[in-house]
Image (spheres, rainbow, N blue to C red):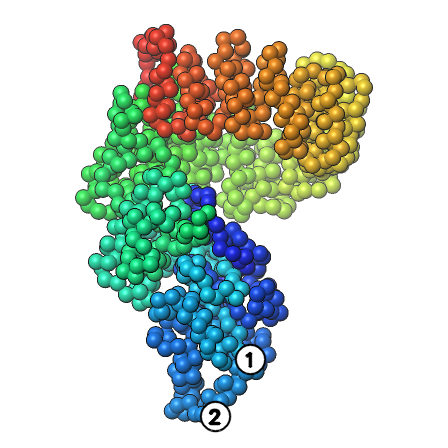
Amino acid sequence: MQVDDVYVPLGLVERKKQSKRQGDVSPEHGSELYKETEITKTFEHNVFLDEVLKQKNTPKSQGKRIAIIGEPGAGKTTLLQQIADWVSREIHQSIVIWVSLADLREKELKAYLLENWLTQVAEKIGKAEATKQLKDDFVALFNQNNVWLLLDGLDEMSASNPLTEIARQFREGGLISQARIVLTCRVNLWDGSSNALDDFDTYRSLDFSYPEQVERFIHRWFAAIPETGKQLCTALKESGKERIQDLVKNPLRLTLLCLNWQSGDGKLPGTQAGLYQQFVDDFDKWKKAEFVTNSKQRQQLNIKLGELAKAAIDKEANRFRLREDFVNLFLGNADDENSLLKLALNRGWLNCVGIDTNRKPVYAFFHASFQEYFAAKAIDDWHFFLNHVPKNPSQGTYRIFEPQWKQTILLWLGREEENLKEQKQQFIDALVSFKDGCQKFYKYRAYFLAAAGIVEFKDYLRANEIVKQITKWGFDYFNIKKQEWVQFSYKITQEARLALQQTEYTKAITALVQLLQSINVDKLTLCQAAVSLEKIDPSNEIAITALVQLLQSNHLVAPTLAAESLGQIGKGNKIAITALVQLLQSNNVNDYTRRLAAESLGKIDPDNEIAITALVELLQSNNVNEDTRRLAAESLGKIDPGNQIAITALVQLLQSNNVNDYTCCLAASSLGKIDPGNEIAITALIQLLQSNKSNNMYDYTRSLAAESLGIMGTGNEITITALVQLLQSNHLDDDTRMLVVSSLGQIGTGNKIAIASLLQLLQSNGVNDYTRCQAAVSLEKIDPGNEIAITTLVQLLQSNHLDDDTLMLSAALGQIDPGNEIAITALVQLLQSNNVNDYTRRRAALSLGKIIRDNNHWFKIVKALSGYWRLDDDFYDLAWKCAQNMPYPDFYQAWHQHNFATCAMRSLKKILFTRII
């Protein structure tokens, strides 16, 4: 296979100066560690060739001195080869000379060119050595400025400081100074010391984009066996493969993946640990010739890399950007030629990714995922992850609940050493049997980790039990709820379904197929199970058949859910398309089902004529009701934007005298969705807002009209103008004014007229506190950071006479100014108050869940919630969110800081209610 067969052009960035590194990244986006932060310009490949090389448009050297830098495997050499080919073709009279700088050995560049390189040229033209005439002609080419020196691998020169040495040779080399030079260098060397090549314009190669360039490379690699390439692309898209998606943006790592996939007959190793071990072995082979090491050196390096990786994840504030002094503790100093750090840098396992505020180097692993892998290899006792002390968690170890350790735990479970097998069995046993003493919040978390763990440790003896249990939690909500009373929330149902997608593939599919084939399952559960099955196994025929059948059922909710699910399966799914086409062509389908089927078909097969025709026929039929006609028009507009038949149908509905206000509002809303800015729709909604009818149904209609105006498009000038005019009316009641203000907050971003109108309202004495509060919230949305809006909300929160609704709205200050103590205190007080209704407390719980970021705030909330007699729904969800964000010992302490009465009540509940788990 030739380079040109698989080459995918990489972009480049022009570097202003060395990047400064402060924040950290998540390992799912580990490639971000290598992104430049100090850049002047970004180039597409062809633009770089034209502007930089042909037009010589560079700030320092006018195209004469170009350095291309990057981490190992970033494609520097391949890019230089492409530059060589391009210059030879496109630059008139150019003479391209390629030199791999590792080949110089002890020679200087000038001597190498005049002796070694020129001798090779002489041999090709039939001469034993370079004659004086050939050498003179060669020198003349330099003096005519026709020579391009492409120098590959500056970091591979044998000199102690290649940058200083090559700079000296450029200065003293005479003819070399006449050449145009493009060189490649690893970023470690370029940034590692004082750079003597500061007259070079520096460009850094970009990673592949995912999925576009990554998939293009894969398809080219497997051009002879395209189905194998498609299978690899599909495997990369699976849930849980986010780290690998990011990892293979690097050309070398993508090449290694393709080699693995090809040698594994279209399969990757069975565990993540197996895949990373294969990467490590392949990477070491790639570097074997370049930096000779023995097995003892490699073993010692890998051990120390593991210790460094483990300590960084455990103790460092920036776990993946590693400080120089921290790295030195494990690997020694980079200035020491015999240090492990020097070896790690040479082999590419560590790379300099920038400098800190003290101008000291910042290092990172080749990819953050390799750091997690090396950390997993350094752990030999499962108690490092979990050492449970039930009555005194502060004395225990609970890394199982720290999100930064999850991937390392999974990699540890996938290790193949036989001596770890019993340890892994004990560890998952401990996860499954974990008891937290806090209403099972952490028990569920431990169990879900065990469900993910059996994917990596395939020999776990009770794996079927785990899958059976999470399937029950995921799809038997109402039966569990009856038996567990307040101990189970729909939140756990959702988390269990997510866990099912992440557990052992075949066992999850088997469990869901059994559920779908059961005769004792209600339609809603069947629909949810089919959706889960399709997510785990796209194109599963059983799942799709079940969804199509549910589409035709008389259930209140299932048909809509089934239609939505079918529409999300993915474009081009042939099984789903065939099933939906057959359904639309049937004579035994009602109009409601036909519309849902047509919309789903249009989503997964855009421009499908059968779907469009079915909806058009519904619109033109005289035998459908207004609601079906409106929904059919909206569906048609979704799958065929701007469809004139759909727009006309909705306009006619709006202009009809026989349509009630509610239907009119819905029709206008639908029209606004498929034809944003439609003046007829806007006028109808404004008229509905202005109406002075008063009843519960009409109040709801007006709210819906305001909401519809708010979603018809940010920056829609017609809508904004109409709302501002309405707001300035002297005959507007408080409720309508509040609705108008809310709508402006959704669509008036940056609009000066809308901002001025809301400011005027804030400064008016004629509005109530609730409207004033809504105006402040809307103003901050469309003019972020507006001081008047924030000041107004603070003043309202500090008032002593607010009603519950206004207090709740004022607490939106927490979203505007995250962590605002006044807002958080007000919401926690609502949560603890005995003088507010349950609805207000629930709204307070919802708001707190959106704005809390600090562990001290979480602690206060848990302490408040621990005293609740009924901890369900929104309160349970808030407590679950606390459990997701708090260390287990802190949650345990807060949960058990309650009074004697609460203890007695809990004891009574244990006596009165049985639990199934």
Task: Examine the rendered structure and indicate whether residue 426 appears above or below residue 122.
Answer: above
- Residue plotted at (57% across, 82% down): 144
Whether residues under marks 1 and 2 lie with C-beta atoms below 8 angstroms apart, the answer is: no
- Residue plotted at (41% across, 72% down): 100
Image quarter of residue 589: top right
Image quarter of residue 749: top right
- Residue plotted at (56% across, 43% down): 604
Cα distance, mark 1 to mark 2? Answer: 18 Å
Question: Which quarter of the image is occupied by the C terminus?
Answer: top left
Q: Disc 1 marks which residue? A: 146
| Res. 414 visible in picture | no
| Callout 2: SS | helix
| Callout 1: SS | loop
- Residue plotted at (45% across, 92% down): 132
Question: Which quarter of the image is occupied by the N terminus?
Answer: bottom left
In this view of the protein, which residue sits in the foreground, 710 or 75?
Answer: 75
Task: From the viewer's perspective, tell me whether residue 601 is left or right of residue 274.
Answer: right
Q: Position of residue 333 (x, y in %)?
A: 32, 55
Q: Position of residue 856 (x, y in %)?
A: 43, 24
Q: Position of residue 226 (x, y in %)?
A: 45, 59
Which of the numbered marks, if any, corresponds to residue 351? none
Task: From the viewer's perspective, tell me whether residue 690 is left or right of residue 490.
Answer: right
Q: Position of residue 231 (x, y in %)?
A: 42, 53
Q: Disc 2 marks which residue? A: 133
Neighbours of disc 1 within 10 Å: few (<14), some (14-19), many (20+): some
Counting labels gives: 2
Task: Examine the rendered structure and indicate whether residue 769 appears above or below residue 249.
Answer: above
| Res. 310 visible in picture | yes
Q: Residue furthest right?
A: 730
